[in-house]
Structure formats: structure tokens, C-alpha cells
Amino acid sequence: MQNFAKKCKSEQKTLVLVPTMGALHEGHLKLIDRAKSRGNDGKTVVIVSIFVNPTQFAPNEDFNKYPRKFENDCKKCEERGADLVFAPNAENMYPDGFDTKINCGKITTVLEGEIRPTHFDGVCTVVLKLFNITLADIAIFGQKDAQQVMVLKQMARDLNLTTEIDVHPIVREKDGLAMSSRNAYLTPDERAEVAEIYSGLKKARDLIAKERHSYKIKEFLLDYYSRKSYFVAEYIEITNFSAEKIAKITDEPALISVAMRTTQSKTRLIDNIITETVK
């Protein structure tokens, strides 16, 4: 992979990476579309990495059952116009004696990091390895993992990385549910109700025009989600774009982030919405 990337660099090509864990859906494919649009015509090489990274899963999480559909994923990549699939295995990425990890500090201790304290160490370490292996000029990530994007941008800034991190808006199903590989776990009853996650976020965003204190918005969402039968809230937070909590909605956009756990399949779903600037 690295030798191929070096050859592309020598030919003045732009390398654009779409990091995934596979089980590709339309949301991933939109990232490939965005990747193809970057760089100069005829000089852009789109690399899709497929690697279910064990270091970002805690022992009680779904690493073993995470959907793996490699042949189908490769077909989708080819149909969408990706140039290369990079699919290492764990032995390639973490050989015997591997003992290094990246920790991005306090930004990783809130929201997802509070619930999954080892998660972002695994994410940052594998992403930095992918950047170094693929020599990516640009990497495309989805806004659904909003805190992940913030963490990776801090890593890039703090470590003087040359890879540009480009963020694509959340891709949703017709009813508003954020697309995720984990949606395949949902039972029919759960699937019929989880679109309400996004409905609540939209209502909260609209409420900000009238109510400027974040705790009031959180109270509204807690009440809204508590009326649902098939999912419960793990957290609801309103933060600025460094993932620090804010007490009052300012004139700048803020991020409303939620994490839900369904009651039947125990699927964990995250979503977020960016507030409109209120003048």
C-alpha cells in the first residue's frame, strides 16, 4: 500500500482516503463520491480502507458480531468508482510487540469518551497508522461521528499532520434515521421508532430560537425521549466544537449530541445536529 502511494505521489496525484470498518451503506458511498470530487481531474486516487479495528472496541462491545461483508463491500466500492480497497488484518496493523497508542487528552473524556473510555485511543492510533500507510492528502469522515471528527482534527493539528480532514454531512434514511452499519441489528419494533431520535433533535434545534439555556433544551429532549418504548438515552449534551459543555446557547452554532440504547437488540445509536446561529 505504501509503495503504491509513493508511486502516486511521484506522479503528482492526490490521494484521498475514506476510512471505514466495512458493511458499507449509502452513507459510506456518499463519502466515496465526495472523495472523487477532491483533487484535480484525472489526478485523484480514491482509497477505501476496510478494517474492523479491535482496539477501539471495549471487551463487552460488538467487535465479534460487527457485520463483515467484504466481497459485497468491494463490489460497492468498484461500482462507485473507488480506485483501491486497502484491507489489512489485525496482524498487519498490530504485529507482535506493538505497544504504542495516541491519546488526544481531555476532548476524549466527555460524551463518547465518558461512556467508552478506551475508544478514542484506538480510533486515533488506527487513523494515524492509516494516514501514514496510505500517505493520504485528504481523508473523508462523516459528521455522524461528530466527536470523532473533533478529536481527529485536534490530533492533526497537535501532531502537524499533513492530511486534510474533510467532513461530509450526515446521510439519513428517508425517515431521518442516521445511516449506520449497526442499524442492521435493529428489531422491526425498534426500527419503526428510532427515527424519533432525529425528530427530537430537530425539535430541540427549533426550540433554541425561544430558549437560550442548554439545560432547558436537555430537559426537553429527556422528556421527549423518555416517552419512547424501544430506546433509552445514554447521554444528551450540548457542546461547543471543542466538545466542552456550554451552559448557554450563544450566537455561534453549537452541537446537540445524543446516544441511545435500544431495549430489545441493545443496539447503540448516536446522532447529532448543529444548531442554527441565533441572532
Image (cartoon, rainbow, N blue to C red):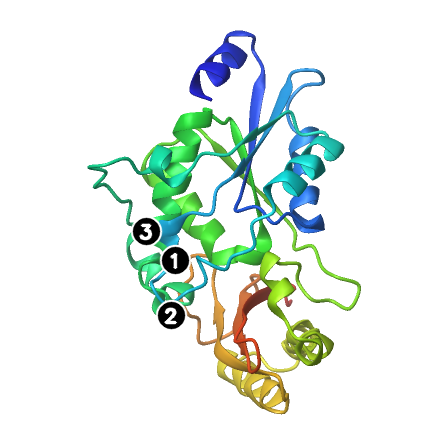
Whichever of labels 1 and 2 marks the residue nearer the N terminus, that label is: 1
Within 10 angstroms of label 2, few (less than 14), some, or many (20 or more) residues?
Answer: few
| Three-letter code for the amino acid on which mark 1 is drawn | Phe
Q: Quadrant of the C terminus?
A: bottom right
| Three-letter code for the amino acid on which mark 3 is drawn | Asp
Q: CA distance from mark 2 to mark 3?
A: 13 Å
Residue 78 at x, y percent in the picture? 70, 31
Q: CA distance from mark 3 to mark 1?
A: 10 Å
**Measured along the vertical axis of the image, is residue 98 above or below residue 204?**
above
| Corner quadrant of residue 245 | bottom left
Q: Which mark is residue 115?
A: 2
Q: Nearer the viewer, residue 260 or 207?
A: 260
Regarding residue 31, the answer to whether it shows in the image is no
Name the residue located 31 percent from the left edge and 59 percent from the top edge: 118
| Corner quadrant of residue 42 | top right
Whichever of labels 3 and 1 marks the residue nearer the N terminus, that label is: 1
Q: Which residue is mark 3?
A: 121
- Is 154 situated left or right of 7 in this image? left
Closest to the camera, between mark 3 and mark 1, is: 1
| Three-letter code for the amino acid on which mark 2 is drawn | Ile
Q: CA distance from mark 1 to mark 2?
A: 12 Å
Within 10 angstroms of label 3, few (less than 14), some, or many (20 or more) residues?
Answer: some
Instruction: Tell me the SS state at disc 1.
Output: loop
Residue 65 at x, y percent in the picture? 50, 60
Residue 168 at x, y percent in the picture? 63, 46
Instruction: Tell me the SS state at disc 3.
Output: helix
